[in-house]
Image: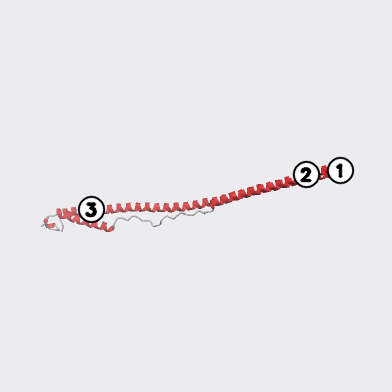
């Protein structure tokens, strides 16, 4: 049988030490759980950010492709409009040439109806020569205008082609996602249960030591030498 006072002191000492050990163990567990939760949240944030960056990058690239398509279409329409205007201008020049040529033909026919005589014949030949020169000049002007129009359209076409190639170069390389974040997440290790068991054993030993210190000699577990 144990001495009551000494036993109480021993139990209290052991219990107090054990409670302290358990409290420290639980506190360490809580700290480890909070640390691991923070590690998991950061890993999830990295994954969500990676997904968001990929989604945003892909969406922006697709938008750029659409914008380039619209700009290329606008260049093609502008070139087609210029070519159509030049074609209409060419038709107008041809029509104007035909009108002026008809006037010259009418004038030439009018001069031919004059009776031939020395002076009249000379005047008619001079008029025919003048009319021929005017017709030649009109044909030359018409030819030069057509060449100038063709060069203008060709220049516009080369510019449009260069711009379209420049626009295409801007989206030639598709969006590529960067390397995915590592999924090898390392969590913090919690307190050792073996260490807790050792602490509890130490508490029990401390309780026995306390009892042994206060117990009468007859009640001591370990007798003093």
Mark before the other along the chain sequence, 3 or 1: 3
The residue lying at 28 percent from left, 54 percent from top is 25
Mark closer to the observer (3, 1): 1
Q: Relative to 103, is 4 on the left or the right? A: left
Identify the residue position indicated by label 3 in the image. 17
Mark nearest the camera among 1 and 2 is 1
Q: Is residue 28 visible to us here?
A: yes
Q: Nearer the viewer, residue 155 or 74?
A: 155
> 80 and 25: which one is in front?
80
State the separation of the CA atoms marked 1 and 2. Answer: 18 Å
What SS does tag 3 mark? Answer: helix
- Judging depth in this view, the residue of 155 and 224 nearest the camera is 155
The residue tagged 1 is 121
Label 3 vs label 2: CA separation? 128 Å
Horizontal side of residue 36 vs 115, given as left or right: left
Circle 1 SS class: helix
How crowded pointer 1 is (Cα within 10 Å; few <14, some 14-19, many 20+) is rated as some
Q: Residue at x 86, y 43 (%)?
A: 121
Q: Could you tell me residue 224's position as x and y percent?
A: 11, 57
The x, y position of residue 217, in whole percent, is 11, 56
Q: Position of residue 4 (x, y in %)?
A: 16, 54
Please rate how many residues cluster around mark 3, counting C-alpha atoms within 10 Å: few if below 14, some from 14 to 19, many from 20.
many
- Number of marks in the rendered image: 3
Can you identify the residue that label 2 sits on?
133
Nearest to viewer (mark 3 / mark 2): 2
- Name the side, left or right, on which 198 lies relative to 68: left
């Amino acid at each position: 049988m144990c001495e009551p006072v000494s036993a109480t002191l021993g139990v209290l000492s052991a219990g107090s030490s054990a409670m302290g050990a358990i409290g420290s163990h639980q506190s360490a567990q809580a700290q480890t759980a909070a640390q691991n939760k923070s590690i998991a949240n950061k890993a999830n944030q990295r994954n969500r950010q990676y997904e968001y960056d990929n989604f945003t990058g892909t969406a922006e690239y697709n938008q750029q492709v659409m914008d380039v398509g619209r700009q290329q279409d606008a260049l093609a329409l502008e070139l087609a409009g210029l070519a159509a205007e030049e074609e209409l201008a060419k038709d107008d020049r041809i029509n104007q040439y035909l009108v002026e040529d008809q006037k010259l033909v009418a004038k030439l026919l009018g001069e031919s109806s004059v009776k031939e005589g020395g002076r009249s014949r000379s005047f008619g030949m001079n008029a025919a020569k003048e009319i021929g020169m005017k017709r030649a000049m009109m044909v030359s002007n018409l030819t030069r205008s057509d060449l100038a129009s063709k060069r203008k359209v060709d220049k516009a076409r080369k510019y449009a082609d260069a711009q379209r190639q420049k626009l295409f170069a801007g989206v030639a390389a598709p969006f590529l996602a960067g390397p995915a974040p590592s999924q090898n997440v390392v969590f913090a290790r919690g307190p050792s249960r073996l260490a807790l068991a050792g602490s509890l054993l130490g508490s029990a030993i401390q309780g026995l030591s306390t009892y042994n210190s206060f117990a009468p000699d007859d009640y001591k577990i370990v007798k003093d030498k």
